[in-house]
Amino acid sequence: MSILDIIPIAFVMIALIGVVNYHFLNLPDTIGMLIIALAVSILVMGIDVLFPEMSIGITVRSAIISIDFQKTLMHGMLSFLLFAGALHVDLDELMQRKAAISLMASLGVMMSTIIIGYGFYLASGAALMTALVFGALISPTDPVAVMGILKTVKVPKALETKIAGESLFNDGIGIVVFSVLAGIAFPMGHDVIEVSASAIAIFLAQEALGGALLGGVAGYLSFLMLKSMDDYVLEIIISLALVTGVYSLATRLHLSGPIAVVVAGLFIGNKGVRYAMSEKTREHLLSFWHLLDEILNALLFTLIGFEALALDLQQDYVIAGLIAIPIMIVARLLSVSVPIKLLSLGQDFTKGAIPVMTWGGLRGGISVALALSLPAGPERDMILTATYVVVVFSVVVQGLSVGWLIKKVVGPLKS
């Protein structure tokens, strides 16, 4: 099936699922899309079992497998989604909370990786390095899922900035940590990383700091171009060129593409929007990126739901995923609590910050994409299925209940 066949089928499915969600479920778009797509996947599996001669499962499964989810997200959609999310984050608020965000996006991710890795190793019987790879890919909160939920619930501004800022940066750090561990555990499928503290530190610094520097420089150059003109069509094209260009260049230079795009998005969303655009351009550009963000989110979460058809759903793998859920929650609690407790000695935090950030730390498509990037084999099948189980739980259960939790521990917010 060619890309010209896949694109219309995908948009027809998204439109139909969106209509069903709007009229019958009325859930937040991302959650509704995932639930309905997952329900359709389960229905197809059931038909396949009851009526194998119809070969519906084989046909649908082959279509899903023909869509390379890992490349579609990591080298296609992710840069646009991260930029769109970063555009709406207040840089001044972010800088006021940079210590908390930096600590949770670095120390928090590494703590969570170790806790989940060792917990999964003890509970599932997986090899230690395989379990640590799973810990690395499931530890970062997914900015796409998190930003989607933040649109549907009211959160105190300070807390919203911490949640959004952490999710935008910790996936970049998490991808770097994953690359290091996957290079050690699966040397035939990933770039081999020298196993020494200095080599790993240099690699982390190059990826993270280099990505941030590249994003800042590219954002500033784009800002100068935007400031020199008043043509909203051309300025939107410049923003598209910035996103695709900086992500591609970062990948080629072995820097963190996600961090580069986030930094560029923060620069344009704050300095660019305020000082380089007319009111008309500002309105058109933000509306364009909002619309693109919504379309890509709908596509992403629909694909996640249908990705169930491509999994090897062995009982042991599903059980491993169910075991990983409480381990993930405990690891998230500790990785949020420790940085906040350390920083609370010198600053105040919003009431209920720890439980909200723990439960609101959703996992999403990035974790699934990272699992799919591993070389084929039993270890990858187990990690992929366990990851999928955790992601579905996180998006559906945590996503639907985080609003209730915020009201419970923070209290009603003024409109």
Image: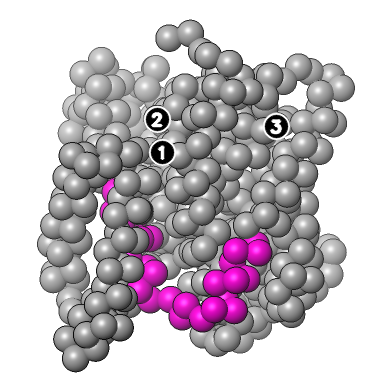
Amino acid type for the residue under numbered disc 2: Thr
**Residue 68 appears in the picture as rendered:** no
- Say if the magenta span includes residue 322: yes
Three-letter amino acid code at the position of disc 3: Ile
Disc 1 and disc 2 in contact, CB within 8 angstroms: yes
Q: Is residue 160 magenta?
A: no
Q: Kindly identify which residue carries mark 3.
A: 354
| Screen quadrant of the N terminus | bottom left
Q: Which residues are magenta?
A: 298-324
Q: Position of residue 236 (x, y in %)?
A: 25, 36
Neighbor class of circle 3 (other Cα within 10 Å; few <14, some 14-19, many 20+) is many
Residue 49 occupies which quadrant of the picture?
Answer: bottom left
Q: Find numbered disc 3 in the image and state the secondary structure of the residue it sits on.
A: helix
Question: How far is the residue under mark 3 from the one under mark 2?
Answer: 20 Å
Q: Earlier in the sequence, mark 3 or mark 2?
A: 2
The nearer-to-camera label among 1 and 2 is 2
Residue at 77% over, 36% down? 337
The secondary structure that dominates the magenta segment is: helix
User: Judging from the image, what secondary structure is the residue with disc 2 in?
Assistant: loop
Q: Is residue 209 above or below residue 118?
A: above
Report the residue at 21% width, 52% height from top.
17
Q: CA distance from mark 3 to mark 1?
A: 20 Å
Give the residue at mark 2.
152
**Which residue in the structure is indicated by mark 1?**
148
For residue 190, above or below residue 363: below
Relative to residue 337, is residue 35 drawn left or right? left
Question: How dense is the environment of label 1, judged by Cα within 10 Å: few (below 14), some, or many (20 and up)?
Answer: many
Picture coordinates of residue 309, whole percent (x, y): 35, 74
Q: Out of 350 and 52, give the one closest to the viewer.
A: 52
Q: CA distance from mark 1 to mark 2?
A: 7 Å
Q: Is residue 165 above or below residue 44?
A: above
